[in-house]
Amino acid sequence: MKYAVQSAALVLISVSAAFAQMASHAPTAVAKERTATTSVPAARPVDETKPVARVNGTVLTERDLLREMYTIFPYAAQHNGVPKKMEPEMRKGALQMIVFEELVYQEAVRRKITFDPSIISKGEAEMRKQFPSQQEFDAWIVAQFGSRQAMHEKMRRTMLVQILLKKEVNDKSVVTDAQAKAFYEANSKQFDRPETFSIQTISIIPPQGANPEVKKEADKRAHDAFKAAKATKTYEEFGLLAEKVSDDDWHVKMGDRKAIDRASLPPDVVKAALVMKPGEVSDLIQIGPNYTMFRLNAHTPAGRTPFGEVKAKLQEDMKKAKTEQLRGSFDKQLRQSAKVEEL
């Protein structure tokens, strides 16, 4: 039975999902206490004890690096490891991450950060619930960490990292409504939207270079489809008809082409759409040798998207950018007084 490696201690304090991936890394201190396992997939044999970096004298190994790489690329097992083309860049990013985590951990120790030790036992109790028996849980602990003590050390380390990151990054990356509104007003042009038409289409497309007989058959199909389309009353009815008779690429999506910029539509389609109401079906339109008809679902005039409609997404994007900036600044700060060697 396969179990996901996670630190329930993180769940207990509701840490950010962006940092929860750290819980799957084996800290250097713990790695020294356990024997190597084969839980990390590899495309080729590797020496998992090989040093890859040294941070203030603490050695980070190939195993630490692999764990981070497979956190970044969780499909490694299906691909027999990380694809070769992706590996150099991924190794570089993973190495930066494990070095950063080690620096954060060492800084947390230096600041003498503490937390309620009962969280460790509570975290272990939560993890135990994932297993049908104590025996299987104990076996998993040995396979993953080497010992229960080593698991507790890993959880303690992860907690210290998360607490410090919360203080230096998470808490400082919050974006208030006022900050988002100020950005919106200062960058208002970013929120201008073009005029769009949301439509479903049915198209009859004769083969290129078709002879007169084939063209005549296409014309008949088009008029039959148009008659049927005019009889539809709902989005679903028109969509099912599109799936049945349309030749265009959207027929597999009920003919739904979503919102299309006015500038991307043929003039004849725009002309028809401008005088239609949502829910109406256009006349049969011939564009070159092709025939089309469409159902208008919505017409959105050009304008500025209201702040209320973009606030949540804007705050999320601003927070992500702020988080990356704060993490980068914190990393730079920690490296100024550290000795980091990439081996």
Image: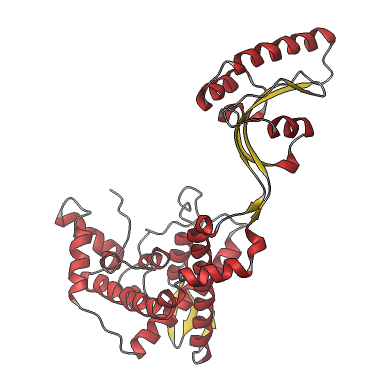
- Report which quarter residue 166 is drawn in: bottom left
Residue 192 visible to an observer of this rendering: yes
Relative vertical location of residue 27 with respect to residue 192 in this rendering, above or below: below
Q: Quadrant of the C terminus?
A: bottom right
Query: Is 177 in front, or is 172?
Result: 177
- Report which quarter residue 291 is drawn in: top right
Query: Is 129 in front, or is 138?
Result: 129
- Residue furthest top in the image: 213
Residue 28 visible to an observer of this rendering: no
Query: Is 154 in front, or is 29?
Result: 154
Residue 156, image x, y percentages: 28, 76
Query: Is 96 in front, or is 87?
Result: 96
Residue 266, image x, y percentages: 77, 34
Relative vertical location of residue 291 with respect to residue 265 in this rendering, above or below: above
- Residue furthest bottom in the image: 337
Left or right of 312 on screen, residue 282: right
Relative vertical location of residue 338 with respect to residue 119 in this rendering, above or below: below
Residue for point 66% across, 42% down = 196
Colour scheme of the picture? secondary structure
Left or right of 16 on screen, residue 190: right
